[in-house]
Image: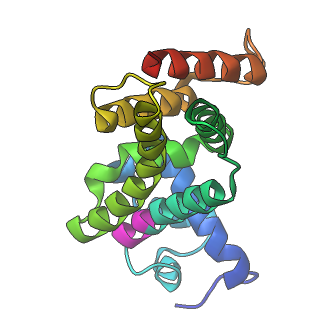
């Protein structure tokens, strides 16, 4: 099947990814068809298979790309200092990285259930790497006697869930600006683990 005139792989490929992300975030993976993605992109349905072998691979690639971006950005973040300073740094990093990406956050957390087992295992490993960065901070704080956390793994999951939840309700132009909300969240996170 021929490409529609004016279709270029370096333009169409990213459009397929962006459109799939937007549609899956809005309607859910199960409700979005390849035909629907193709129509939104402006290509024939069969042309999508030039960019992805199937819908499962498309979902996996969206989620893996997001997690790789998270891990790369975290590796470049400045999380130095004592455990409380590092915890503030992680909190601010998570908020600043995730808030501008609500569709990626939604898909990455809500569509895990739709991944094939082998794809889920890869994503779970990447997510574990991210979670470990926070858990290491909490463990160091416990060892230093500044944090009182009975189970660092549970505390890690609770903090990440709280921080990620911000992406679901925050809207620009609301009652409080992002800086004020970030300060409130840093305070909440610190209070949740401090002695």
Instruction: Judge whether residue 56 is colored magenta.
Output: yes
Is residue 84 visible in the rendered image? The answer is yes
Residue placed most toward the observer, 45 or 174? 174
Q: Is residue 40 visible?
A: no
Q: Is 82 situated left or right of 118 in this image?
A: right
Of helix, strand and loop, which mostly describes the magenta segment? helix
Compared across the picture, whether 140 is left or right of 7 comes to left
Tell me where residue 44 appears, x and y as whole percent. Answer: 54, 75
Residue 75, magenta (yes or no): no
| Residue under the point 44% across and 26% down | 145
* Residue 61 drawn above or below residue 155: below
Query: Measured along the vertical axis of the image, is residue 52 above or below residue 108?
Result: below
Question: Which quarter of the rendered picture does the C terminus lie within?
Answer: top left
Q: Position of residue 127 (x, y in %)?
A: 40, 54
Image coordinates of residue 155 in percent, x first then y, are: 36, 30
Q: Over which residues does the magenta segment extend?
A: 55-60
């Amino acid at each position: 099947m021929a490409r529609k005139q004016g279709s270029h792989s370096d333009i169409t490929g990213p459009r397929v990814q962006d459109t799939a992300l937007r549609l899956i975030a809005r309607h859910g993976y199960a409700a979005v068809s390849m035909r629907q993605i193709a129509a939104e992109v402006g290509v024939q349905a069969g042309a999508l298979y030039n960019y992805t072998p199937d819908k499962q691979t498309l979902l996996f690639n969206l989620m893996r790309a997001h997690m790789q971006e998270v891990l790369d950005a975290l590796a470049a973040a400045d999380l130095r200092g004592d455990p409380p300073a590092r915890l503030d740094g992680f909190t601010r990093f998570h908020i600043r990285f995730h808030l501008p990406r609500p569709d990626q956050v939604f898909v990455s957390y809500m569509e895990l259930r739709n991944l094939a087992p082998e794809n889920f295992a890869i994503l779970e490993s990447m997510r574990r790497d991210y979670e470990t960065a926070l858990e290491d901070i909490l463990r160091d704080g416990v060892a230093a006697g500044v944090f009182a956390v009975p189970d660092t793994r549970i505390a890690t999951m609770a903090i990440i869930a709280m921080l990620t939840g911000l992406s679901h309700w925050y809207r620009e132009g609301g009652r409080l600006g992002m800086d004020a909300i970030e300060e409130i969240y840093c305070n909440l996170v610190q209070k949740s683990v401090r002695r």
